[in-house]
Image (cartoon, rainbow, N blue to C red):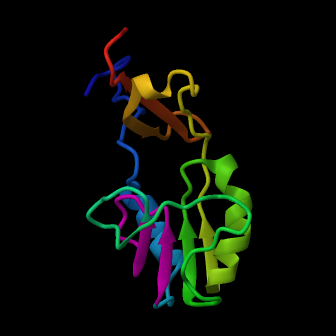
Amino acid sequence: MGVWMGRLPVTRFKESWVWDDTEEKLYRRLLKGCKTVLHLFSGRSSLGTVRVDEKNFPEVTHRVRIKPVEGFRLNFGDASFDAVVADPPWINRYLTWLSKEAFRIARRKVLIITGCFWLEPHKKYAQAWRLKHLYVVKRVSPVVKLVFLYERSHPLL
């Protein structure tokens, strides 16, 4: 840990798909009394009785690739969970879909966490690069920032 002008740095780096302990506690508190919670885009969080993500993290209970297109529905009935939590990684692509599906599935509460925007390589370069790390940087400005580290996955031709 470096020191800047005699002070500890305010920047904290944390790999993505996991929340800060204080965030997780807040979301749990907001969902108090909900016995069944569907957590969409759950990542490495253990919040929720059913955790849906396309990644194969150990905490995920249902591995599903969510397609944010008109008509795509998850295999859950209407009002089948007390609450739905969603922390979508690609804000612009998922908000419209979530505005329908989360509220269809929830019986009591909907908690949607949004932040900055997702960054991907242009399609021309996408096959040559892979996302190695994604960090959430907090407490450095009024805005939560996402820091992406891409590594080349194929050698230069």
65 or 40: nearer the viewer: 65
86 or 77: nearer the viewer: 77
Above or below, 151 against 56 in this view is above
In the image, is 115 to the left or to the right of 50? Answer: right
The N terminus: image quadrant: top left
Count of residue discs:
0
Q: Which residue is at 36% across, 41% downward?
A: 14
* Residue 109 horizontal/vertical position (percent): 63, 81
Quadrant in which residue 28 is drawn: bottom left
Question: Residue most toward the top?
Answer: 157
Magenta segment includes 43: yes
Magenta segment includes 1: no
* Residue 116 horizontal/vertical position (percent): 61, 42
* Residue 73 horizontal/vertical position (percent): 63, 73
65 or 100: nearer the viewer: 65
Segment tinted magenta in the rendering: 36-52
Q: Which residue is at 36% across, 59% downward?
A: 21
Quadrant in which residue 114 is drawn: bottom right
* Residue 69 horizontal/vertical position (percent): 69, 59
Quadrant in which residue 71 is drawn: bottom right
The C terminus: image quadrant: top left
Q: Which residue is at 74% across, 63% downward?
A: 70
Above or below, 39 against 95 in this view is below
In the image, is 2 to the left or to the right of 75? Answer: left
Q: Which residue is at 70% across, 63% downward?
A: 97
